Image (spheres, rainbow, N blue to C red):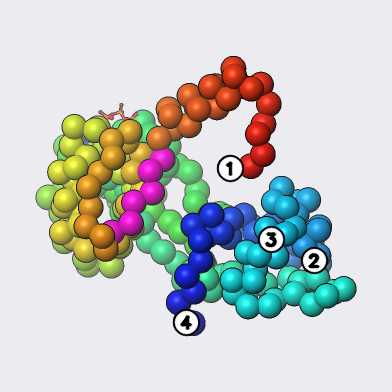
């Protein structure tokens, strides 16, 4: 499929659409209107139509969208037709929680290798995932063709490990630490700072007391 340049905001909504379309498919629904979709996923229908238009006209007036066609389409775009293996670095509290969290249930992503400097946990299997010592990082990532990594290590070591990941040809990093990491342009970073998210929520509740549209 040709590369389609889509806005980041649209890209972030694709998994939401994808998940809901799967629910429709399971319920044997053949088609869905943008209004129906809009109510279910809480995105206004004009936005939905605009999002979908980036991929060509997929809906028919008066008919809506064909669930199976749309699903097949998103599956390809989201790489859900192939299993993506992901590495996790740092099997502490958060790392453990993510290993336990079954990504595979709702998506075609799974953590297939974990790494930790702690000798007590390296060379063990945690929640069905092998944990390797850090000195095996590059070797395992290359051998297992893993290009995505989740960082749940202390902030003091996060940049050093990032550099090692870049050296091992990783293309995407999900950074759970509050520190902003430096990477070359070829590597994408998604920051997930849970404390910050919670503080933002509290700030909005305290200052506005209600939801201000979607994000
Ligand atoms: P969390 O922050 O996830 O709640 P925690 O409080 O249990 O975790 P941290 O000190 O944040 O522990 O460390 C998270 C994990 O990262 C630990 O399992 C620790 O052994 C591991 N870790 C620390 N330094 C490194 C390193 N240089 N390389 C790999 N793993 C590391």
On the image, numbered disc 4 is attached to which residue?
2
Asked if disc 1 and disc 3 are in contact, CB closer than 8 Å, the reply is no
Residue 98 in the image: state x and y as whole percent.
Answer: 42, 42
Asked if disc 4 and disc 2 are in contact, CB closer than 8 Å, the reply is no
On the image, numbered disc 1 is attached to which residue?
215
- Residue at x-position 65% and y-position 68%: 52
Identity of the residue furthest to the left in this view: 135
Residue 189 in the image: state x and y as whole percent.
Answer: 34, 51
Task: Say what secondary structure mark 2 lies in.
Answer: strand
Label 1, residues with CA under 10 Å away: few <14, some 14-19, many ≥20: few
Q: Is residue 70 left or right of residue 114?
A: right
Q: Is residue 163 left or right of residue 100?
A: left
Q: CA distance from mark 4 to mark 1?
A: 29 Å
In depth, the one of 129 and 28 nearer the eye is 28
Identity of the residue furthest to the bottom in this view: 1
Asked if disc 4 and disc 1 are in contact, CB closer than 8 Å, the reply is no
Residue 57 in the image: state x and y as whole percent.
Answer: 68, 77
Task: Say what secondary structure mark 3 lies in.
Answer: helix
Label 4, residues with CA under 10 Å away: few <14, some 14-19, many ≥20: few
């Amino acid at each position: 499929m040709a590369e389609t340049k889509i806005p980041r905001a649209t890209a972030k909504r694709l998994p939401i659409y994808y998940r809901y379309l799967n629910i429709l498919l399971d319920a044997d629904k053949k088609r869905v209107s943008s209004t129906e979709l809009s109510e279910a996923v809480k995105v206004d229908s004009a936005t939905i139509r605009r999002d979908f238009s980036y991929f060509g006209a997929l809906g028919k007036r008066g008919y809506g969208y064909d669930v199976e066609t749309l699903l097949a389409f998103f599956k390809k775009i989201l790489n859900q037709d192939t299993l993506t293996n992901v590495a996790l670095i740092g099997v502490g509290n958060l790392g453990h929680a993510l290993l336990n969290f079954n990504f595979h249930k709702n998506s075609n992503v799974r953590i297939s290798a974990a790494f930790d400097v702690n000798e007590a946990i390296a060379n063990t299997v945690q929640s069905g995932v092998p944990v390797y010592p850090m000195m095996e990082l590059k070797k395992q990532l290359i051998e297992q063709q893993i290009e995505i990594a989740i960082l749940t290590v202390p902030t003091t070591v996060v940049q050093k490990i990032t550099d090692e990941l870049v050296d091992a040809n990783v293309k995407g990093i999900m950074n759970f630490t509050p520190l902003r990491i430096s990477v070359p342009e070829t590597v994408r970073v998604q920051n997930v700072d849970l404390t910050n998210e919670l503080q933002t929520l509290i700030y909005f509740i305290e200052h506005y007391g209600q939801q201000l549209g979607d994000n």
